[in-house]
Amino acid sequence: MRSSENRDQARAERETKIQKASFIERRLFYLKKHLLHIFLLINLFAMFVPTLAQAQSPTLPPQISAILKSMTPQERVGQLFVVTFKGTDVGDTSEIYDLIVNYHIGGVVLLAQNDNFTAAPDTLTQTHAMIESLQRVAWDTSTAPVTDSASGLTQGNSAFVPLLVGVAQEGNGYPTDQILSGLTPLPSEMAIGATWNTGLAQQVGEVRGRELSALGFNLFFGPSLDVLEAPSISGGDLGTRVFGGDPYWVGEMGRAYITGLHTGSNNQLLVIAKHFPGVGGSDRLPEEEVSTVRKSIDQLKQIELSPFFAVSGNATSPEMTVDGLLVSHIRYQGFQGNIRATTRPISFDPQALKQILALPEFSTWYENGGLMISDDLGTAAVSDFYASGGGQFLAVTAARDAFLAGNDMMYLGNIVSSDAPDTFTSTTRVIDFFAQKYEEDPAFAQRVDTSVARILAVKSGIYEDFVFSNVVTPLNALANIGTATDVTFDVARNSATLINPDIQDLASVLPLPPQSDERMVFITDTAGYKQCSQCAEQSSLAVDALQEAVLQLYGPQSGNQTANFRLTSYSLSDLQTLLDDLEIPLIQDDITRADWIVFSITDSSQGQAALVSRFMRERPDLLLDKRIIMFSFGAPYYFDTTTISKFTAYSSLYSKQTQFVDVAARLLFQELTPIGASPVSIPAVGYELISVLTPNPDQIIPLFLDLEVVPEIPDSLITPEPTPIPLFQIGDTIAIRTGLITDNNGNPVPDGTPVKFSMMLTGEGAGILRQVDAVTTQGVARAAFGLDKPGLLEINVTSDPAVISNILQLDVSQSGAVAVTVVVPELTETVASPTPEPPVVEVVDDYISTEGYPRLSAWFVAILMIVFSTGIGYGVGIQVVNRRTAFRWALGIALGGLAAYNYLAFGLFGITNWLTAGGITGLVTFVIFGEFLGFVVGWVWSRR
């Protein structure tokens, strides 16, 4: 009975457990179902509000937070927009006045194409006055009482938020500069890159930052951090607007330039790097068409994004950190790895932009207040993209898409919507739409507030307090603008690059500069430009610019190495006329008489390089025996191999500013030697950047112990102790580092260059004990080894193709500590084994000895000739004159022949060398010459 009760109890317990298990399973099922619903709702929410998660508001100072709270919805929305306007009028009837007062815009950009600048000499003073007037309009608006249109009640003043006044002043003059006179003429980015000198990059940035901030600008669109990985010989790429084609060096130059902008402006200039995430791989300009590049995000991280990493999350100081990024309109095919999937333009694609900003190198920078600004929405590239397929371009849609993609500010530019008559109407409709959306959609309003908080934060980084006196700059600050031309000359001198031939061959092809009696023809690529539509036209590179530089440096007043009448200048248009046979221009006659033809081009977008190549191909008759010199004041890769081979010398200067023309003249007359190196590949001459930047194989890599640096105590009266010699024993760890590893240009190799450290055991049981792979940072690599085996150890390092280094030796034993010995190997050249040559068969001359003297056989031939000639002379003399005269003729011939032979026989005055080369033929000729002279003497004798 007890056993029956036990069975019932056990059965009841099992049923209870089954019920509990069933209950738990049901609860888990419902929990999983709810979690799935929540997950789907989160994803659905993220689709409609894709950037809320990334748009973290930076911590705001109390005064900024107070300003944000006091702003009306219209004022908040207005801060999102950077606009443009026409002309220089900012009075109360102007459109820009309306946008500032009634639409509360966040900033303006000044453009030469909008006639925002006047002609010289008033360009700078007018610009300064206009910027001050713009800020005053914003200030006066904040101090004026505000009347509510609905209630009619007068409210308190609104908070003053300074305008961002921006400009894109890239360098190199027209068309990449907006202010074309008055400022220091600074070089292009590629010219800076060709110096490989970050110090010069910082100096240029300092000049740019100082001058722009003195005018009142507080927003700078630049520098371009695009990597020109594969230059296009036909043009269409960014050309000289980039620092180069290597991501590491573009990042280093960008860091230095941005540091200069910040320090030069006393941190009163917001630096917005472009064209994020990089358009160097595109085949067209970003403002002309939305280009598509086939690259995944992993490929972008290696090339395009690397320079932007360097100035954001990987920046090592606030000065080298950008304040914002200008998001370009570029599409990527295979962004997620699927080559058949193409993103929308990044500036309008929330998923792609969010994924990029989530990278560790950007996330911290963005969370700390980095600003995202869309590239110009008013370009043809944007309107064509939206209107493709027969649709319309609606400015409201483009601005909304750019904002929801993750941009904090929208640069509207000269935007014209398909449903609006002009830019002003399009702009106001966009702002009205955003204001209405703010009122209707709380999620949208939250997104606006987040971006406005970021905008206010970066503005507060420029000005300690938002008061008018902090925003405007004094007029006397303009006195120091435009005076830093020495910096430009330093860049020009250090960037000038000899493309072809190699520097070691230059002296053989151009042993001498132009001489004082030689003629030169200068053929120059020139184009006109205007500061404004009503301004006088100027030349970007005057047709006689190089001629004038030559005369100034080497003309009659400066050494008299040339004269004006020997120099002639023509434009490429004149060359076109010559080739098209439209007329017979003077250029043909001058080229025919010239000893030197000097070409200068600035670009290839208008077919300049093709025209020069055509001339070289179609008129070789005009180029015979002439020195053909080519100076590229643009990019260095415009010509193919065949055309380059026809130039006597081809150099690139990368910028067309006056200082670069001056350096070109000095190169022409060999006063300067080109010391720059191209920062981009030039396939036509076999210059591949990736190979150039590898370690130089002809170097001995220095190797040192990586010891801690003992800080010096300033003004210490204590005699410093000598540095103790480090000792090592079994169980210790030895830390080592390389010295500076250099590339083939003599510069530090890029960060990330692979280096291999090897520790070897010599003697009995020799072999490699351990190898450590490392990479370089600032040209130096580090490693550490544990000493766990006794013996004579050697440590060396290689960085392919550089395989020779110093050697660290130490004899580790069980008994005690030992010091390290540094062995420096000798770098020996590999001597190639000579090619075996066939034995030389010496040919023996039967008439002339090897020393150059006649043999007996030659004497016999000479005597026969003399006897024969004497007989002929006597016989002719008897027939023509008398016997006495004939005898004298014959005697002269005989004595002359014998004298000539004896001259050869005695080897007088080095005649042996001549006779060795001439052989029997030379002997016969010389004897006949002697007989002729003897006959002349006999004839004179017979006349007496």
Image (cartoon, rainbow, N blue to C red):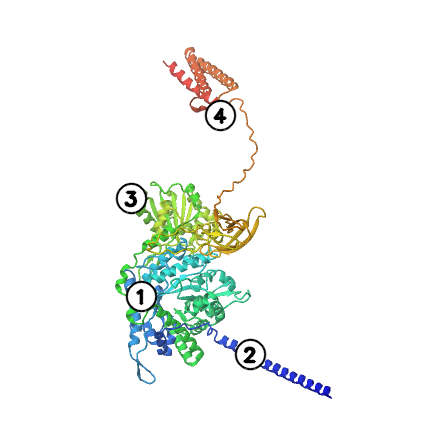
Q: Residue 801 location in percent, x, y?
A: 51, 50
Q: Earlier in the sequence, mark 2 or mark 3?
A: 2
Is 317 left, or right, of 7 in this rendering? left
Identify the residue position indicated by label 3 in the image. 556
Residue 38 position (above or below residue 681): below
Instruction: Name the residue carrying label 4.
Output: 916
Residue 422: % across, % down: 38, 72
Q: Which tag is nearer the camera, tag 2 or tag 1? A: 2
Decide which of 626, 35 is in the foreground and name it.
Answer: 35
Q: Residue furthest top?
A: 883
Residue denoted by label 1 = 216
Q: Tell me which numbered mark, 1 or 3, is placed earlier along the sequence.
A: 1
Q: Nearer the viewer, residue 708 or 461?
A: 708
> For mark 2, what is the residue?
35
Tell me where residue 446 sits by quadrant.
Answer: bottom left
Nearest-to-viewer mark from 4 and 3: 4
Q: CA distance from mark 2 to mark 1?
A: 55 Å
Q: Position of residue 677 (x, y in %)?
A: 42, 51
Residue type marked 1: Gly
Marks 1 and 3, Cα distance to the nearest angstrom?
45 Å
Marks 1/3 in contact by CB < 8 Å: the verdict is no
